[in-house]
Image (spheres, rainbow, N blue to C red):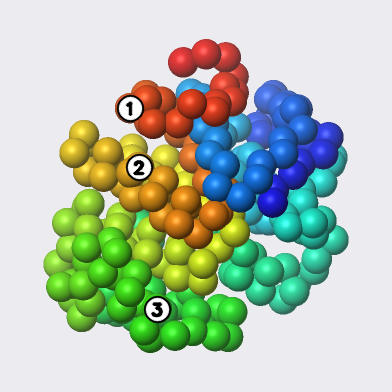
């Protein structure tokens, strides 16, 4: 489902990183650990089709994604890749439902029933019409996850999804990501420096040395 070949990139003025070739099947999980400034977010952006590598290729479902251009790349990303950031990046003027529907808008399709099902699975149905400003940090991150899952992606990428959460909410977010990725048979990749995540995912890569 996700494969990389000869990836090499520079993540700051002095740091260069070469990634061993990856090959992940539907339902596989990978944890990328590293200190701040070790290039974790850079590799996530490369896998997401947001930042071309200096060398190498990224294949998703057999497609070499950096051969796609412009709108073709944007639509492919919207349909196949769900991204969860450290901060939810929800639009405050919109309701919870409207924020989730944005994912549908960018690929030109959507189903209101699927939004309802997704909110129920994430135990957030009661917040469907709520404004973002009324949500707790944990609730906002759940809605960000719902938006990332809205198009049933083949790849779920999470960038420091627990860094700003307390222990209870951090565990809930990780379990939610793992459960939903298994249900969708999606590849799950989490990049983080948060040591609490290590106990949940056995398959790991360390960047910039052990932490």
Task: Give the residue displayed 49% in from the left and 26% down from the top.
Answer: 202
Asked if residue 46 lies left or right of residue 113, the reply is right
Callout 2: SS: helix
The residue identified by callout 1 is 196
Q: Is residue 90 above or below residue 163?
A: below
Task: Give the residue displayed 45% in from the left and 57% down from the top.
Answer: 183
Q: What x and y, as percent, mark residue 133?
A: 19, 67
Given residues 201 and 5, the one toward you in this image is 201
Q: Is residue 115 visible?
A: yes
Asked if residue 208 lies left or right of residue 163, the reply is right
Inter-mark Cα distance, 2 to 3: 22 Å
Residues at circles 3 and 1 in contact by the CB criterion of under 8 Å: no
Task: Give the residue displayed 23% in from the left and 77% down from the top.
Answer: 128
Q: Earlier in the sequence, mark 2 or mark 1?
A: 2
The residue identified by callout 2 is 174
Given residues 178 and 14, the one toward you in this image is 178
Number of marks drawn: 3
Callout 1: SS: helix
Residues at circles 2 and 1 in contact by the CB criterion of under 8 Å: yes
Residue 63 lies in quadrant: bottom right
Q: What x and y, as percent, mark residue 66?
A: 80, 57
Asked if residue 62 lies left or right of residue 75, the reply is right
Q: What x and y, as percent, mark residue 176?
A: 34, 50
Mark sitting on residue 130: none
Inter-mark Cα distance, 3 to 1: 32 Å
The residue identified by callout 3 is 114
Eye-nearest disc, 2 or 3: 3
Q: Earlier in the sequence, mark 3 or mark 1?
A: 3
> Is the residue marked by circle 2 packed among few (<14), some (14-19), or many (20+) residues within 10 Å?
some
Q: Earlier in the sequence, mark 2 or mark 3?
A: 3
Q: What x and y, as percent, mark residue 188?
A: 52, 46
Callout 3: SS: helix
């Amino acid at each position: 489902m996700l494969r990389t070949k000869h990836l090499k990139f520079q993540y700051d003025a002095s740091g260069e990183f070469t990634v061993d070739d990856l090959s992940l099947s539907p339902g596989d999980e990978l944890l990328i650990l590293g200190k701040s400034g070790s290039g974790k977010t850079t590799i996530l952006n490369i896998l997401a089709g947001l930042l071309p590598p200096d060398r190498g290729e990224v294949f998703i479902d057999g497609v070499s994604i950096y051969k796609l251009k412009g709108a073709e790349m944007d639509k492919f990303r919207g349909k196949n890749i769900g991204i969860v950031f450290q901060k939810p990046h929800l639009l405050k003027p919109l309701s919870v439902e409207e924020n989730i529907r944005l994912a549908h808008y960018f690929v030109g399709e959507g189903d209101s029933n699927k939004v309802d099902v997704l909110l129920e699975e994430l135990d957030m149905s009661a917040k469907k019409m709520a404004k973002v400003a009324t949500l707790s940090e944990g609730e906002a991150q759940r809605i960000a996850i719902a938006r990332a899952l809205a198009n049933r992606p083949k790849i779920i990428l999470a960038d420091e999804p627990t860094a700003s959460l307390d222990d209870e909410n951090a565990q809930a977010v990780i379990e939610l990501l793992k459960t939903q990725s298994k249900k969708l048979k999606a590849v799950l990749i989490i990049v983080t420096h948060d040591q609490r995540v290590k106990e949940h995912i056995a398959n790991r890569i360390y960047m910039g040395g052990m932490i």
